[in-house]
Amino acid sequence: MTGPNAPSPPTADHGRRASLLVLLGFAWGVALIAGALILPVYGSATLVAENGSGVLIPVAIPALVSAAVWVALHVKCSRGGHSAEVVAWLLITALFLFCLVAVFSIGALVLPVAALLAAAAVMTPSPI
């Protein structure tokens, strides 16, 4: 397809944008951890104060998945390889499923992370 509406081939700019999206997803995940530690959600008690430090495990999942997706997408972008892309999509799908399971607690707050990671995976170029 040619013309002004033709899709552009993947470029280094796509890789930078994908990295920025993953970084935003990671930052959102870190903000969730910080929020669990410092924002009062039960009157004056934080999520950690009310439920114990074990609550940080599910709250940290988005940040951890973001870091793992970044590694997988970096491998895809720098070395190519279908397996790195598959790993990234498996992690993103698992995070979307986590959002569904946790929809009545933190799932809605995690959904932006999953969406940012999915957008990054779509635009991450492979080396030619």
Image (cartoon, grey):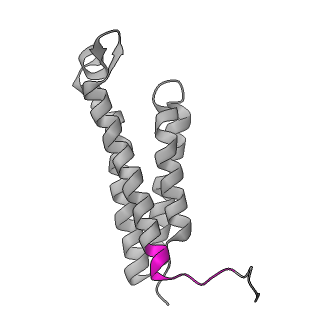
Q: Position of residue 65 (x, y in %)?
A: 38, 51
| Residue drawn at x 42%, y 72% as measured from the top left | 16
Q: Position of residue 39 (x, y in %)?
A: 31, 23
Q: Is residue 34 above or below residue 51?
A: below
* Residue 7 relative to residue 55: left or right: right
Q: Does the magenta segment cover residue 74? A: no
Residue 94 in view here: no
Figure quadrant of residue 79: bottom left
* Residue 119 relative to residue 79: left or right: right
Q: Position of residue 9 (x, y in %)?
A: 59, 84
2 or 125, nearer to the observer: 2
| Residue drawn at x 40%, y 66% as measured from the top left | 19
| Residue drawn at x 40%, y 53% as measured from the top left | 24
Figure quadrant of residue 48: top left
Residue 27 in view here: yes
35 or 98, nearer to the observer: 35
| Residue drawn at x 47%, y 35% as measured from the top left | 109
Quarter of the picture containing the N terminus is bottom right
- Read off the magenta span: 7-15
Q: Position of residue 15 (x, y in %)?
A: 45, 74
* Residue 12 relative to residue 37: left or right: right
22 or 93, nearer to the observer: 22
Q: Is residue 12 above or below residue 99?
A: below
